[in-house]
Image (cartoon, helix red, strand yellow):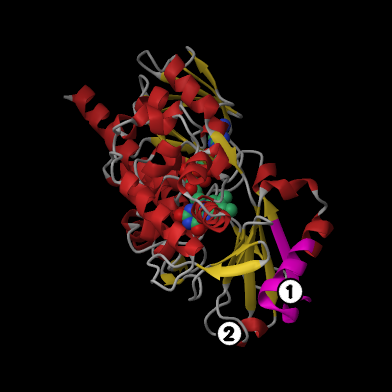
Amino acid sequence: MSFHVEVAIVGAGISGLSAAWQLYKLGVESLVVLEANSRVGGRTLNYPLVSGGYVEQGGTWAGPTQTALLNLAKEMEVSIKKGKLEGQTLYGFRQKWTMLEVSPTLESDIAQKDFAQAMTTFEALCRTVPVEAPWQAPNGKGLDSMTMGTWIEQNTSTDEARAWFEGCVRQILSGDPNKVSLLWMLHFVHTAGFNDLLETAEDFCFVGGAQQISLNIAERLGKRVLLNAPVTKISGYDGSCVELVYEHGIVFAQQVIVAMMPKAVARIQFDPPLPPIHHQLIAEWETMSWIKFHAIYEKPWWQSEIISGHFLSIDTKIEVLDISPEDGSKGVIVGLLAPDYTTLLKSERQELCLAFLRETFGETTQQPLEWVEFDWNHQPWTGGCISVLPPGLLTTAGSALRSPVGRIHWAGTERSSIWVNYIEGAIRAGQKAADDVIAKLNSVST
Ligand SMILES: Cc1cc2nc3c(=O)[nH]c(=O)nc-3n(C[C@H](O)[C@H](O)[C@H](O)COP(=O)(O)OP(=O)(O)OC[C@H]3O[C@@H](n4cnc5c(N)ncnc54)[C@H](O)[C@@H]3O)c2cc1C
């Protein structure tokens, strides 16, 4: 089947759908969203439980400063509810669990003071990085030449502070500090806000799950969303009409928005080939992928016995959180496992996690009603959980991040200037791409 539209969008994650919805609301009805998968929502996914209800295997939480997400959810009639339970994170290092003090007192130990000092230095450095053009930061090249891990090493003097700082980075990134450019990380933290990332980014979640927002947009767009339609080739973007080859035919479009993970974009053939700076950017993003698991219980038996429902072990690279519903109707613990664990059998992972839950939440966690896990490494069209920039790339190719190539515009959370890797960033990038497309369409018609 071949047909013509004004705008074609590749990818029906929340970014592509936000772009489509924005265009549609502004009067562009001739559009199509081509989605490779048999469902919409991309990295947001509701997963039905045998014991009733669902858990979320991908993006779940939102914070109060994520206004694009909160507004879109409201518009799509998806309401919010309280997110993760109260309680500060406990960081585990060498078998000891510690609650971090951001403002230590005179009585605090050396490690706590060391940690707080490093945090203060890091926050001050974050503020030197411009939001829209981080590659123009003072000493940008220098900051981009090292990893976040190296900076932590150089700016802490105790093993504990080093480990805790690494734990904080893992918590906000779900990724390895040793693979991330310091400059990229400074920008990421600066634009989202340190406190927001560590304290409030999980304040809310969505009734019916975050995927419901995408499902509701897709329902309103109707036949404009095509599922099982992977795009394999995009050509003619430098001419008068773009041709997109997908599984069942060809779409001809005046403007195109590509809204997906860079790793997924790398699988599309571009004719002519993309300019080297764009090609480099797409090829060199580093993808990180954790395994998410949920343990479901009849009741949150452990809650009267613990002081916090959030543990992150630096030794084992496992993070667990109590996300039981407030009414106590069941007990739910969610966890994230580092990619190192993908080589284990599912049964081995479960055994290991249950031992970890016994250590953190107590004996009552030994017999879950249900155990589900989801490995984003093995999803055909998504290619992992998040993408980060390794050292050197932001200053050499960062200026191409948000710049169109001919008739191709870029969206997807990785292209946002703020809240990168979050749903908020995905929506903002989608809406910006839609606004740019409208401007292009208007400039042609006048
Ligand atoms: C485990 C996990 C937990 C997370 N937790 C949170 C959280 O609590 N809060 C938060 O804000 N964010 C969270 N995130 C991140 C958030 O889910 C993502 O940032 C966001 O969903 C990305 O949306 P996107 O539209 O940019 O990309 P995607 O969701 O990846 O969408 C891209 C779409 O493109 C499609 N596609 C790929 N290739 C092709 C092709 N060739 N042709 C057509 N279509 C194609 C894909 O199938 C996909 O549907 C989490 C992510 C994961 C994985």
Compared with 331, 399 (above or below) is above
- Which amino acid type corresponds to the residue marked 2 in the rendered image? Gly
Nearest the camera: 183 or 272?
A: 183
- Residue 5 in percent (x, y) is at 39, 29
Q: Residue at x 62, y 57 (%)?
A: 314
Q: Is residue 281 among the parts visible in the rendering?
A: yes
Residue 328: which numbered mark, if any? 2
Q: Magenta segment: does it hold 369?
A: yes
Pick whichever, 8 or 416, lies toward us.
416
Q: Which residues are magenta?
A: 352-373
Q: Is residue 78 above or below residue 363?
A: above
Q: Residue, x 46% and y 66% (percent of image)?
A: 206
Label 1 belongs to which residue? 358
Which one is earlier in the sequence, the residue at label 1 or at label 2? 2
Residue at the image position 63 percent from the left and 50 percent from the top: 290
Does 137 appear in magenta? Answer: no
Quick check: can you spot residue 329? no
Q: Which quadrant: the C terminus?
A: top left
Q: Secondary structure at mark 2?
A: loop
In the picture provided, is 416 more to the left or to the right than 250? left
Horizontal placement of 352 versus 439: left or right?
Answer: right
